[in-house]
Amino acid sequence: LHAEALGLDQVGSDLLQLQIRAFNQWLAKAIILGHSPLFVIHGMGKGILRGQIHQLLQAHPYVDYYTNAYHPQYGFGATEIILK
């Protein structure tokens, strides 16, 4: 969800809103296609994007479990998502 990977050049709250929108679209497609586990790469930074994503995942009816544990390929800047 890095701005550069999404082709975005906005900053601040506009960027966060666009990243959250991209995440929601990506998650909806993954649910439809039945992909699990998933990894969303949000980076480490200040944790604002990660916090927003975790808040959405906590309340999502199709998410069984998620964790931000270390992953050999993605490090700590990614969250693993297990769908129901």
Image (cartoon, rainbow, N blue to C red):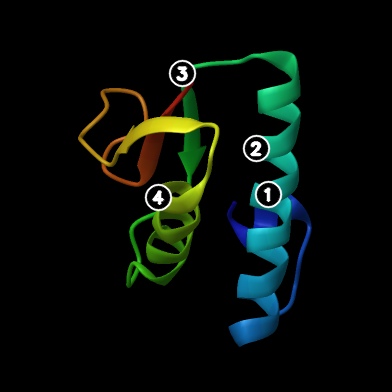
In the rendered image, is residue 64 in sight?
yes
Residue linked to disc 2? 27
Q: Position of residue 41 (x, y in %)?
A: 48, 43
- Of the image marks 2 and 3, the number of the one nearer the N terminus: 2
Q: How many marks?
A: 4
Residue linked to disc 3? 37
User: Does 39 appear above or below 26?
Assistant: above
Residue linked to disc 1? 24
Kind of element beneath mark 1? helix
Q: Amino acid at mark 4?
A: Gln
Q: Amino acid at mark 1?
A: Asn
Q: Are marks 2 and 1 in contact (CB under 8 Å)?
A: yes
User: Does 72 appear above or below 65?
Assistant: above
Q: Are marks 1 and 4 in contact (CB under 8 Å)?
A: no
Residue linked to disc 4? 58
The picture quadrant where one finds residue 19 is bottom right
Which mark's residue is nearer the viewer, 1 or 4? 4
Q: Are marks 1 and 3 in contact (CB under 8 Å)?
A: no
User: How far is the residue under mark 2 from the one under mark 4?
Assistant: 13 Å
Kind of element beneath mark 4? helix
User: How far is the residue under mark 1 from the one under mark 4?
Assistant: 13 Å
Q: Amino acid at mark 2?
A: Leu
Relative to the observer, which residue lies in front, 43 or 18? 18
Relative to the observer, which residue lies in front, 28 or 76? 28
User: How far is the residue under mark 2 from the one under mark 1?
Assistant: 5 Å
The reply, left or right, for residue 70 in relation to residue 39 is: left
- Of the image marks 1 and 4, the number of the one nearer the N terminus: 1
Kind of element beneath mark 2? helix
User: How far is the residue under mark 2 from the one under mark 3?
Assistant: 11 Å
Q: Position of residue 18 (x, y in %)?
A: 72, 67
